[in-house]
Image (cartoon, helix red, strand yellow):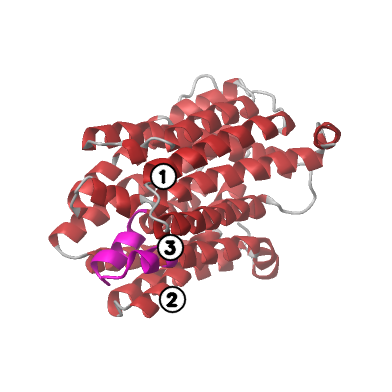
Amino acid sequence: MIKAYFEKLQNTPKGYRLANTVFFFLSGFGYSSWASRIPHIKAQLHLSEAQFGAVLFAFPIGLMFTMPFTGKLLNKYSSRYIMLLGAVMFNIVLSLPGFAAYVWQLIIILLIFGASRNIFNLSINAQALEVQKLYPKSIMTRFHAVWSLAGFAGAGLGYVMVTQRIDPSMHLLGVSILMLAITACFYPLSIHTEPVMQEKKKFFSMPEKNLIKFALICFVSMACENTMYDWSGIYFQNILHASPKLTTAAFVFFMTAVTLGRFLGDYAVMRFGIKKILLYSGIFITLGFLLCFLMPYIYPTIFGYILIGIGVSCVVPLVFSIAGKSSSLSSGSALTSISTIGYLGFLIVPPMVGFISEYLSMKWAFLVMAFLGGLMVLMVNKIGENE
C-alpha cells in the first residue's frame, strides 16, 4: 500500500513538493539536534567560552570552503544528486560530535559537518526553486517553515534527552540512523533538474549589483540566527545561571517563534510586501537582543529570544527567493553567490561572540548583535519600492 502510494507520487508536482519538504525537515531536525547538545559537549571537553568559540569556527570554515565547489557541482549535475550526496554526508557526520574525546577531534568533525551542511542546504534550496516553478503561489517560505518546524522538533527531542540524561553520543547516533533511513525512502520522489553548463569560466560569481544589499541583509540574519543556535543555551547557563531544563526550554521558545514566523511568512508578504517584512525583521532582532542585554532575567530573556526568532524567521527564505529570480545566473550559481556573503555572517560573528564573552561578558556580545540588527534596518531602508 505504501509502495503504491509512493509510485503514484513519482514524477508529479505533489511528489516533488513532498520530497523537498522531507529533506528540509531532515536538515532542520539534524542541525537542531546538534545545537540542543552544544552546552553538554562544551562541558564534556572542559572548554571556556573563548576556546569553544574557536572550536565553533571550524563549522563555518568547512561550510565556506565548499561554497564555490557546491556551486560548480550544481551547474554540472542535477541538484537531486548533489542533495543525496549532501544528505548522506550530513546524516553520517551528525552522529560523531558526541563521541569526540579531544578538541582536535571535534574540530575535524565540525569542518566536515559544515561542508556537508553547505552541500545539503544549497541543493535543497535549488530543488525548492525548481518545485516553486510548478506552483502559481509562493511556497518557498513554507519550505523554510518546515525546516524551522523540524528545528523545533529537534530541540524538543533534545529537551527530552537532557531531562532523561541520555548521552549526546547515543542521542545523535540514533537521530543519524533514522535520518539515513528517511533519506533512502524519499530520495526517489525528488525532482530531476538539468545541469547548467554555460558558466564554466566562473568558479565563483559575486551577486548581481541589485542583489548585494539583499546579501548583506542575509549576512546579518544568518549571523544573528546562528548566534542563537550556538550561544543561546550558554547565555542562559552563564549569565542567568538557569537549570539545564530551562536552558533547553528557552531554545525551544526561540525555535517556536522561528517556526511560526515562517509559516505565516507567505501571508505576511502578500499583505505587507517584502520590504516591510524585512524592516520589521530587523526591528524585532534589535529589540530582542537589547532586551537580553538590558534585562538579564529568565522571563525577559525568553521574550527577547521570541522577538529574535520572529525577526530572523523570514529573512533568508525571502532573500533566497529573490536570488532565484536572477536574470544572468542559474539558480544554483545565484544561491551560491548570495549565500557566500550571507554565510560570512555565519562564519565571523558567532565565534566573535565567544571572544567578546571571554574578555567582557556575553551580555556585551548580545549588545553587539543588537547593533547588527540596527544595521539591517538601515540597509532595508535603502531598498527601492519595486524590489
Q: Mark 2, mark 1: which one is toward the viewer?
A: 2
Residue 303 numbered mark, or none: 2
In this figure, which residue is indicated by the disc labeled 1?
343
Circle 2 packing at 10 Å, graded few (<14), some (14-19), many (20+), is some
* Secondary structure beneath label 1: helix
Q: Toward the viewer: 306 or 8?
A: 8
Earlier-in-chain disc, 3 versus 1: 3
User: Residue 351's x, y, as percent?
Assistant: 27, 49
Can residue 241 be found in the magenta stretch? Answer: yes
Marks 2 and 3, how far apart at CA: 11 Å
Q: Position of residue 254 (x, y in %)?
A: 47, 65
Question: Can you tell which quarter of the image residue 332 is in?
Answer: top right
Q: Is residue 235 left or right of residue 263?
A: left
Q: Which residues are magenta?
A: 230-249
At x 31%, y 54%, the residue is 39
Name the spot of residue 387 as percent of width and height, x first: 60, 56
Image spot of residue 280 (x, y percent) = 52, 70
| Residue labelled with disc 3 | 251
**Amino acid found under the numbered disc labelled 3:** Phe
